Amino acid sequence: MQTDTVLAMVLSLARQGLTVLGAILASHGYLSDSQTSDFVGGGLVLVSIVWGVWAKHTAAKKTQVIETVAAKTGETREIPTPSVEAKADAVIAGKTLP
């Protein structure tokens, strides 16, 4: 599944969840109706920030593992071969060691 599709689904679920939570808080008097949209917007900003940090961390980790696997297999190309990428994905998943 493409990252953009997953991000869209996560943000949609987060928006719906925050909307429900905001409605519950408003019905119990913790938020006014006008504050509910601010609550949802702020929550989506936080979800987006966390997603961005996680995506950058994962990409950096994969790059590091690809470089390690490529070095051990003698791969010198700038763009790794599919076998190197597959080995790196296995390492990241915890299935094998580089």
Image (tube, rainbow, N blue to C red):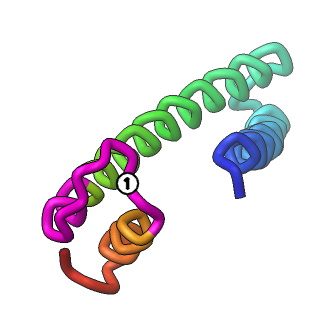
Q: Amino acid at mark 1?
A: Pro
Residue 26, visible in the rendered structure: yes
Residue 83 is a magenta residue: no
Looking at the image, which residue is at 39% across and 46% down?
A: 79
Residue 32, horizontal then vertical, whole percent? 79, 20
Residue 83 sits in which quadrant? bottom left
Q: Is residue 54 left or right of residue 37?
A: left
Q: Residue at x 80, y 42 (%)?
A: 12
Q: Residue 77 at what x, y percent from top left?
A: 30, 48
Is 68 magenta? The answer is: yes
Q: Quadrant of the N terminus?
A: bottom right
Query: Residue at 39% of width from left, 38% of height from top?
Result: 56
Q: Give the percent coordinates (x, y) of residue 93.
A: 39, 75
Residue 32 located left or right of residue 59: right
Q: Secondary structure at mark 1?
A: loop
Q: Which quarter of the rendered picture does the C terminus lie within?
A: bottom left
Instruction: Find residue 45 and report its horizontal and vertical position in percent.
Output: 59, 25
Which residue is more in the foreground, 34 or 97?
97
Where 22 falls versus 77 (above or below)?
above
What residue is pinned by disc 1? 80
User: Looking at the image, can residue 24 be seen?
Assistant: no
- Looking at this view, is 78 or 92 the one in front? 78
Neighbours of disc 1 within 10 Å: few (<14), some (14-19), many (20+): some
Image: magenta residue range = 67-82
Please state if 41 lies on the left or on the right of 23 as rendered.
Answer: left
